[in-house]
Image (spheres, helix red, strand yellow):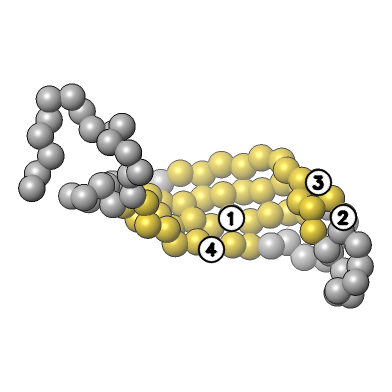
């Protein structure tokens, strides 16, 4: 289980008019999630909820993501440990 937060800037079109110009707006975000331990092949799962609070706009984006994590290299292996076949 993990949680965090911080500040950031989002550059986007914040108007309902598609021809409106892009703006950069400062905001804060809160994140919470759960991550599984790596399974036999190094695969793991992650579920995360992120809520972004933007100053001066009428909406606060909320994102729910589901991820599958897998190693790209063997850096996580311990020396002298033979992986299962």
SS label for mark 2: strand
The residue beneath circle 3 is 26
Q: Are marks 3 and 1 in contact (CB under 8 Å)?
A: no
Q: Quadrant of residue 72?
A: top left
Mark 1 nearby-residue class (10 Å; few <14, some 14–19, many ≥20): some
Tell me the tag on residue 23: 2
Distance from label 4 to label 3 (Cα)? Answer: 21 Å
Image-based side of 52 in relation to 54, left or right: left
Q: Residue 26, percent across and down? A: 81, 46
Q: Is residue 36 visible?
A: no
Counting residues from the start of the chain, the first of labels 2 and 1 encountered is: 2
| Local crowd size for mark 3, using a 10 Å CA cut-off: few (<14), some (14–19), many (≥20) | few
Q: Which residue is mark 1?
A: 50
Q: Position of residue 18 (x, y in %)?
A: 86, 74
Q: Residue at x 69, y 62 (%)?
A: 61
Report whether 68 appears left or right of 58.
left
Residue at x 46% of width, y 44% of height: 2
Which of label 2 and label 1 is nearer to you?
2
Tell which of 18 and 38 is nearer to you: 18
Say left or right for 72 vs 2: left
* Real-space Cα separation, disc 2 to disc 4, in angstroms: 24 Å
Foreground mark, 2 or 3, reads 2
């Amino acid at each position: 289980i993990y949680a965090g937060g911080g500040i950031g800037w989002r550059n986007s079109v914040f108007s309902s008019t598609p021809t409106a110009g892009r703006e950069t707006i400062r905001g804060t975000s809160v994140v919470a999630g759960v991550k599984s331990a790596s399974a036999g092949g190094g695969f793991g799962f992650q579920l995360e909820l992120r809520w972004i609070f933007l100053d001066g706009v009428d909406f606060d984006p909320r994102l729910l993501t589901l991820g599958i994590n897998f190693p790209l290299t063997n850096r996580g292996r311990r020396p002298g440990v033979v992986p299962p076949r």
